[in-house]
Image (cartoon, rainbow, N blue to C red):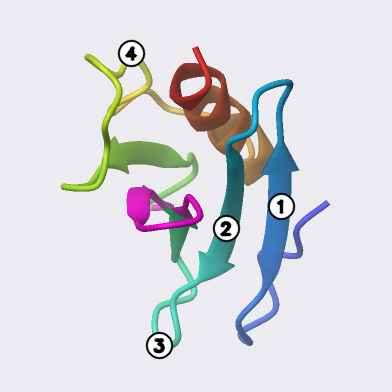
Amino acid sequence: MLDTQNQGPQCIDQQKESSMALRIRQHDRNPNLWWVSSSKDDVAYIARPGNHYRAWTTHGWKARHANFVGIPFDSIEEALAAVAKEATS
């Protein structure tokens, strides 16, 4: 589980059946913001603007419409799983 209380940068990897691996890293100065990256580019970000986590795409998102955008998630792992599911489909 990702420790969201720690202020330092953290990374976790999300590997799915396909060859696309996603990596999440906490923003250097904002403890409520994480970047989700593929091997080439940032493809999404996850923010915690209150009691829930929400994910949005960036300019690097290559898949079609993303169904996870703006939906509240209970954990950062749940938000990352939603991003990974659509990025690999």
**CA distance for labels 4 and 3:** 28 Å
**Labelled pair 3, 1 in contact (Cβ < 8 Å):** no
**CA distance for labels 3 and 1:** 21 Å
Image point (22%, 14%), residue name: 65
**Labelled pair 1, 4 in contact (Cβ < 8 Å):** no
Does residue 38 show up magenta in the picture? yes
SS under mark 2: strand
Which residue is labeled 1 in the image? 13
* Residue 29 place in picture, x, y as percent: 40, 87
The one nearer the camera, 73 or 83, is 83
Q: Earlier in the sequence, mark 2 or mark 1?
A: 1
- Single out the mark in the foreground, 1 or 4: 1
**Labelled pair 2, 1 in contact (Cβ < 8 Å):** yes
Labelled disc at residue 67: 4
Labelled disc at residue 29: 3
Magenta span:
37-48
- Single out the mark in the foreground, 4 or 3: 4
44 sits to left or right of 15 = left
Image point (55%, 29%), residue name: 84
